[in-house]
Image: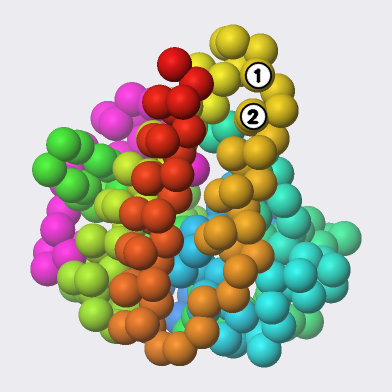
């Protein structure tokens, strides 16, 4: 999810890389799950998140949607899935003790917390969000270890490409909306949803990155040709 805000207002004012030590470690949260409560539709999923959730639950996209673990919303001009809150306004993946049932395969936003990402022309940096985590006593831990992601370099390359792709498609959506092309907006939104979420990506994580890069390239070419044809 793209946020427009003042960096100094939401952070400690510093930018970090994956090898920096930051006060993040909450010692297994000690029973706290406030960050998993009352967050609405803000835990937006990307294609890798969906890949991991399907692996963790042995459910495909349709099943996760039908069983109420995820839902669809308009995010940044696109139809994207997000984690659904249950009747208690808690993450649908929490158990009765407030523990995450998919922790080793949790979404990227959950892995980051209380970190965020700030993007620039070269890539992105991490930053520590202020006043988000209620745990005041946190130990320093290397960001790389905190994220707990295999092949982190490859994952970061994917995150950047996915961010740029979604931003690019979002800008096209704005043009379509300004020119009152409602049918084309729906077609483009469904193309992205079906290609990157409904269609299952099989295999291991290494295979995921190869396949998702091919998918992004394919859709970029389709949309670019479509834009030219519309001119």
Query: Disc 1, disc 2: CB below 8 Å?
Result: yes
Where residue 152 appears, x then y in whole percent? 24, 74
SS assignment at label 2: helix
Q: Residue at x 67, y 89 (%)?
A: 58
Q: Residue at x 60, y 48 (%)?
A: 191
9 is within the stretch colored magenta: yes
7 is within the stretch colored magenta: yes
Where is 186 relative to 61, above or below? above
Magenta region, main secondary structure = loop
Does any portion of residue 25 appear in the rendered image? Answer: no
Q: Is residue 94 left or right of residue 231?
A: right
Where residue 162 appears, x then y in whole percent? 37, 52
Q: Residue at x 59, y 39 (%)?
A: 188
Residue hosting label 1: 181
Q: Is residue 161 left or right of residue 191?
A: left
Where is 211 relative to 116, above or below? below
Does any portion of residue 172 appear in the rendered image? Answer: yes
> How is the model colour-coded?
rainbow
Q: Which quarter shows the C terminus?
A: top left
Q: Residues within 10 Å of mark 1 (few under 14, many from 20)?
A: few
Q: Quadrant of residue 111?
A: bottom left
Q: Residues within 10 Å of mark 2 (few under 14, many from 20)?
A: few
Marker disc for residue 184: 2
From this viewpoint, which residue is outermost toward the top? 179
User: Where are the magenta residues, as a range?
Assistant: 1-24
SS assignment at label 1: loop
């Amino acid at each position: 999810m793209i946020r427009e805000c003042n960096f100094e207002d939401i952070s400690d004012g510093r930018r970090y890389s994956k090898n920096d030590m930051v006060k993040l470690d909450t010692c297994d949260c000690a029973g706290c799950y406030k960050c998993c409560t009352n967050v609405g539709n803000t835990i937006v999923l990307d294609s890798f998140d969906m890949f991991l959730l399907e692996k963790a639950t042995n459910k495909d996209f349709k099943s996760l949607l039908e069983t109420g673990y995820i839902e669809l919303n308009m995010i940044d001009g696109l139809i994207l899935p997000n984690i659904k809150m249950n009747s208690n306004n808690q993450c649908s993946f929490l158990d009765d003790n407030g523990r995450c049932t998919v922790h080793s395969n949790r979404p990227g936003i959950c892995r980051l917390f209380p970190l965020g990402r700030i993007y620039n022309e070269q890539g992105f940096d991490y930053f520590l969000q202020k006043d988000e985590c209620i745990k005041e006593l946190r130990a320093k831990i290397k960001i790389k270890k905190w994220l707990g992601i295999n092949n982190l370099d490859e994952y970061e390359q994917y995150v950047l490409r996915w961010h740029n792709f979604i931003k690019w498609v979002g800008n096209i959506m704005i043009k379509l909306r300004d020119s009152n092309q409602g049918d084309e907006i729906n077609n483009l939104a469904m193309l992205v949803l079906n290609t990157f979420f409904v269609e299952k990506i099989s295999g291991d994580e290494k295979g995921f990155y190869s396949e998702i890069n091919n998918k992004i390239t394919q859709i970029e070419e389709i949309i670019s040709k479509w834009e030219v044809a519309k001119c």
